[in-house]
Amino acid sequence: RARNVMQTPSVECMTARAMLSEAQGDLRTASREWEAVLPLLETQGVGTSLAYASALAELATIYASLGDAKRGYEYIHRSRMQRELQGYKDTRGALTAKHNEAMALWNLGELQSAFALETDVLNRRIERDSIDGLTARWNERMQRRDEAALPTAFVTPSALKEAEPVIDL
């Protein structure tokens, strides 16, 4: 959550209002309020901070909840890129942002891109030996690259190839 966005009283108030609207379930108002916070962060020089990345991620979540998968993807991608620009490419937060971007791609129907991004997330976690949250069984499956063992939330490359329609002209 974008709780570290608090920079000035104006941003603090706007952020609090956006969070309150979101907590009350008024996501449309929350999205407008978060959208109003972004330019303030940019003009204050905070537009290159992790607070800005968190605000972008907050908007991504809201738009995804509203059913606007395209805008949700755009904001989560910007959030991930912001984290990487700050040098947080292989942190847990950056990997979470990349995972969220993969899910956003999935929601857009970009299955191959989603699968590639999520595979990268898992490989980076395995490489870093920071697989907390992943079971030993999942780790074992990924190391074997056993496509049959992947969860059904992801379509494997071979399944994608089989699913592509072939039209003979």
Image: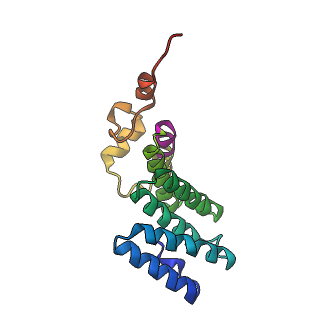
Where is residue 163? Give x, y as percent. 41, 25
Main secondary structure found in the magenta portion: helix
Query: In the image, is residue 91 above or below residue 103?
Result: below
Relative horizontal placement of residue 90, taking residue 107 as reference (left or right)? right
Does the stretch in magenta take in 113? yes
Task: Provide residue 32's location: percent of width, then percent of height.
Answer: 51, 70
Residue drawn at point x = 34 percent, y = 75 percent: 24
Decide which of 43, 68 is in the foreground and name it: 68
Is any part of residue 167 visible from this angle? yes
Residue 60 belongs to magenta span = no
- The reply, left or right, for residue 44 in relation to residue 57 is right
Q: Is residue 72 above or below residue 123?
A: below
> Is 138 on the left or on the right of 68, as rendered?
left
Way the structure is coloured:
rainbow
Query: In this picture, which residue range is highlighted in magenta?
Result: 111-119
**Residue under the image location 43 percent in, 26 percent down:** 158
Whole-percent x, y for residue 59 in the image: 49, 65
